[in-house]
Image (cartoon, rainbow, N blue to C red):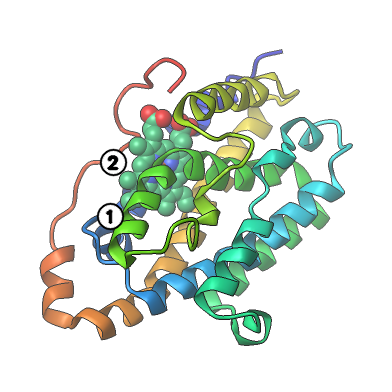
Amino acid sequence: MSSDLASKLREGTKHSHAIAENTAFMKCFLKGIVEKEPFRKLTANLYFVYRALEAELQRYCSHPVVGLIYFPELNRQGNLEKDLAFYYNEDWRNQIVALEAGKAYVARIHELANTEPTLLIAHAYVRYMGDLSGGQSLKKIVRSAMNLPPDQGTGFYEFENIPNIEAIRAFKAKYRHALNSLPVDDILAEKIVDEANYTFELNCHVFHELETDVKAAIGDYVFDLLTRQDKSGNTSSELVAAD
Ligand code: HEM
């Protein structure tokens, strides 16, 4: 049974993707403005999100639908822990705090897990496909913006079992194939796309909450200059085969 869920998700979230790319936080990021304080707070909030998501996906790893999209090689929690030890210190667990937007995001993951676990597919798709796509360019930006020592600070963007561009391309094709093979009818597919759009929103709320720190670091004037213009989104063009 092919639900064509992969194309439905890509097409159905294009607009949300463009909005996420055009958040002030991401615009600054793409222009090489990666300040330590907002970046480590983002890392901390991603840690809370992935910890919740991965625990719930693990809980449903034998579920007839959710289990088919569970790929432990994608798990980010361990690498986020290493990054946090780098950006804070060994005592990072006592220092990190969830933003309001981070708490809402985590709460949504647990709520779905307890009520409609198939919608967790949307959450996995938005984060992991994003990490395997634009996330790879963001890694280069982070490394050069903060002039990081080799092998430190960007574990989040590194997949030990998916180590290079060819492997990433092949994995994304496998993931899309898995999405398409899910036993999902049109109504459920639509709900998953809606939840994916909501997941983009939850991510944007985290970015917005971090803007205050970016402004504090670079000043209102530069912030306004950098964030003035919008661009069309990276997923707005046709899908290149197996990209
Ligand atoms: C400035 C930030 C971003 C850039 C430059 C960017 C760039 C890209 C690029 C180049 C692709 C690949 C498109 C393709 O396969 O043809 C992509 C895909 C994707 N991105 Fe982003 N992205 C950004 C932010 C985000 C954010 C914040 C999220 C979610 C939180 C996200 C989620 C996704 C997803 C889910 C896909 C897969 C689309 C699909 O093929 O189904 N991206 N992104």
Measured as percent of width and height from the top left, residue 206 is found at 46, 68
| Most foreground residue, 69 or 96 | 96
Q: Is mark 2 within 8 Å of ligand 1?
A: yes
> In this rendering, would 15 be left or right of 154?
left
Which residue is pictured at 67% across the width and 80% down the height? 93
Measured as percent of width and height from the top left, residue 176 is found at 58, 24
Image: 223 above or below 24: below
> Label 2 amino acid?
Gly
Say which residue label 1 marks: 22
Measured as percent of width and height from the top left, residue 107 is found at 68, 67
Total labels drawn: 2
Quadrant of the frame with the C terminus = top left
> Label 1 amino acid?
Asn
> In this rendering, would 120 be left or right of 150?
right
Q: Is residue 17 visible?
A: no
Image region (quadrant) for ligand 1: top left
Q: Is residue 228 visible?
A: yes
Image: 126 above or below 146: above
Measured as percent of width and height from the top left, residue 167 is found at 54, 26
What's the CA distance linking mark 1 and mark 2? 8 Å
Q: Secondary structure at mark 2?
A: loop
Image: 223 above or below 243: below
Say which residue label 2 marks: 233
Image: 94 above or below 169: below
Q: Tell me where residue 27 sits by quadrant.
A: bottom left
Badge 1 crowding class, 10 Å Cα cut-off, few under 14, some 14 to 19, many 20 or more, is: many
> In this rendering, would 181 be left or right of 210?
right
Q: Is there a contact, CB below 8 Å, between mark 1 and mark 2?
A: yes
Which residue is pictured at 36% across the width and 53% down the height? 20
Q: Secondary structure at mark 1?
A: loop
In the rendered structure, which disc, 1 or 2, sits on the residue that comes first in sequence?
A: 1
Q: Tell me where residue 224 sits by quadrant.
A: bottom left
